[in-house]
Amino acid sequence: MRHPAWAIIAKLQNHAKSLNLIDMRKYWLLFAQSTTVALGVLFVVALFKPDLLRWQAQPHSLTIQQATQSAPAVLAPAESFAPAAQKVIPAVVNVFTQQKVRTPTHPALEDPIFRYFFGDRLDSRPREVSNLGSGVIVSANGYILTNHHVVDAADEIQVALADGQTLPARVIGADPETDLAVLKIDADKLPAITFAQSDSLKVGDWVLAVGNPFGVGQTVTAGIVSALGRTHLGINTFENFIQTDAAINPGNSGGALVDAAGNLVGVNSAIYSRTGGSQGIGFAIPVSIARQVMEQIIKSGSVTRGWVGVEVQDLTPELAESFSLKNTEGALIAGVLKGGPADSGGIRPGDILLAVNGSKVTDSASLLNLIAALKPGEAARLTVARKQQALDLKIQIGRRPMQRMQEAEPDVN
């Protein structure tokens, strides 16, 4: 027989359980009612005031922000380019050079009577010639990327920063075949530019050209990408230009071409003009080439390229027909340097070069770029068409000798 105290405890426990059950039912009913009311309010807001639901737009704005970091920003013409300009202007510098030029001595200068009437107008003493251009700060410790023709043969180079400082600069190295040069100034904590992805640019994208045209001071102009991959212009040996209608004038050379997010996509290099000023056709060296050349110059002071010793020309429809080819893709081997890598590898004049290590050759310019990208000393597979048969030839790549644009054509690749 249980003790009366145990009976009392059991009754109290049963009573507590019943109370807990009642409380839980109350809480559940309250939760259900609150949820119903909340859903009702949400439905009414979504029906009549959908713009109040800001959380719906958050995933889209996050996607746009990520795209901005990896690709050029897309802006409407009415929007401002001020954020991009503010980002890039501190990283663009003005480059001033001076060169001492000595004029030839004139025999009449030895005649005292002649000198009495004409003075020293024909004097052969050195005179200073000034030049101006632009450059882009590529590292915080003072490396600057510019055009080779801006600093070529300069005896003195001064760089003016956006904050007003003017510092002497020295040439670390230059590459005349791409018209690029790297300068160095003794400074640190500089505002370096951000490089865009090499394949991010597309025809129709907005771009800004930043530089010092005609020496008037830092200037920003806007335009679009008119074309990509421009070659056969006769400007550089290696050409793969970005064409833009952003105003580029004398003094802009070496300046920055940036996307609408302020990332470097090219180095302004040349214009097509009959007046000497901008006529809507400007050319910039793409960031992919500029970065490769810059890194090699900083590392070793020069640029090393592959070379096989062939003279090539583009295939015309008439030539393609004479060789029984279906199209004009490829490059005709017009000459082979005796004793060169191509000669040793079995390439002959009259061969049609179709591919380099499996990469298709579209014309002589693409062949030049494919060969130059190879490392000297390595073996490469060149596919040629000979008497309507495809042959794979193994070539030992040599080192391309330095060449300048003023050298006599044709060029040997």
Image (tube, helix red, strand yellow):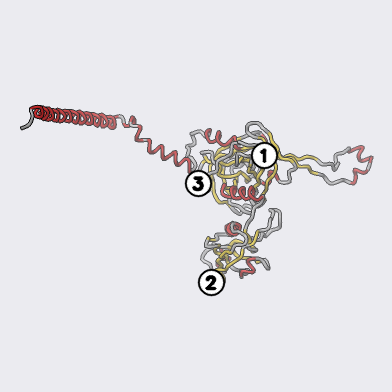
- What amino acid is found at the position of numbered circle 1 in the picture? Ile
Tell me the CA gap for discs 2 and 3: 39 Å
Q: Whole-percent x and y of residue 130? A: 74, 39
- What amino acid is found at the position of numbered circle 3 in the picture? Ser
Question: Which mark is nearer the camera, 1 or 2?
Answer: 1
Neighbourhood count class around disc 1 (C-alpha, 10 Å): few under 14, some 14–19, many 20 upward: some
Neighbourhood count class around disc 3 (C-alpha, 10 Å): few under 14, some 14–19, many 20 upward: few
Relative to 124, residue 356 above or below: below
The first of marks 2 and 3 along the sequence is 3
Tell me the CA gap for discs 1 and 2: 56 Å
- What amino acid is found at the position of numbered circle 2 in the picture? Gln
Q: Nearer the viewer, residue 221 or 403?
A: 403
The first of marks 1 and 2 along the sequence is 1
Residue at the disc numbered 2: 389
Q: Which mark is residue 200?
A: 3
In terms of secondary structure, where does tag 2 sit?
Answer: strand
In terms of secondary structure, where does tag 1 sit?
Answer: loop
Q: Residue at x 47, y 40 (%)?
A: 68
Q: Is residue 80 visible?
A: yes
Residue at the disc numbered 1: 185
Quarter of the image for residue 352 reads bottom right
Quarter of the image for residue 193 reads top right
Q: Is residue 390 left or right of residue 61?
A: right
Q: Whole-percent x and y of residue 406? A: 71, 53
Quarter of the image for residue 381 reads bottom right
Q: Is residue 328 visible?
A: no
